[in-house]
Image: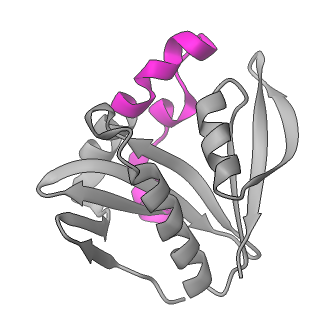
Amino acid sequence: MTRLSVFHESATTIRRAVESDVSAVRDLTCAAYEKWIPVIGRMPMPMLADYDKAVREHWIDLLFQGEDLAALIETKCEADHLLIVNVAVRPSFQKRGLGRRLLAHAEQLAASCGLQELRLYTSKLYTVNIALYSRLGYASDREEPFKGNFIVYMSKRIG
């Protein structure tokens, strides 16, 4: 599989996380998801993930603005699609288009692997996120109950 490892645009850099980044990945994810605790009434699953394992088994790409770790995207290459496991943007960097930039990066990753579909899942209560994914061309495929809420499964075909 071909992997895009580094992307530069002005002061923005994207690189793959390595073992020494685990703590930073965990900290950024927890900061990004903390706002959702009162919405869903519990800690979101990304706050509870095993990032030692995730850094070894998934692709976690870190987006830096200058020297600051601003956002990340965690993906997993499946046989017929690229699964977007997590997109997290540090609160002080939100509303700057970094999530959209990382989702576009995921499309490039999928294409480099010869995959024509991306999939993701999110809480039905994350309406802002669902609206963003829909604007970016993701379709809602199904919903399933999960811990007193619903998970929305979405996908996007790419050319």
Asked whether residue 25 is in view, the answer is: yes
Q: Position of residue 47 (x, y in %)?
A: 46, 31
Q: Is residue 48 part of the magenta span, yes or no?
A: yes
Q: Which residues are magenta?
A: 30-58
Which residue is more in the foreground, 94 or 154? 94
Residue plotted at (38% across, 39% down):
95
Which residue is more in the foreground, 55 or 85? 85
Q: Quadrant of residue 6?
A: bottom left
Q: Is residue 136 part of the magenta span, yes or no?
A: no
Q: Quadrant of residue 34?
A: top left
Residue plotted at (38% across, 52% down):
98
Which residue is more in the foreground, 98 or 34? 98
Q: Quadrant of the C terminus?
A: bottom right
Asked whether residue 53 is in view, the answer is: no
Is 95 located above or below residue 146 in the figure? below
Is 54 located above or below residue 47 in the figure? below
Residue plotted at (49% across, 31% down):
48
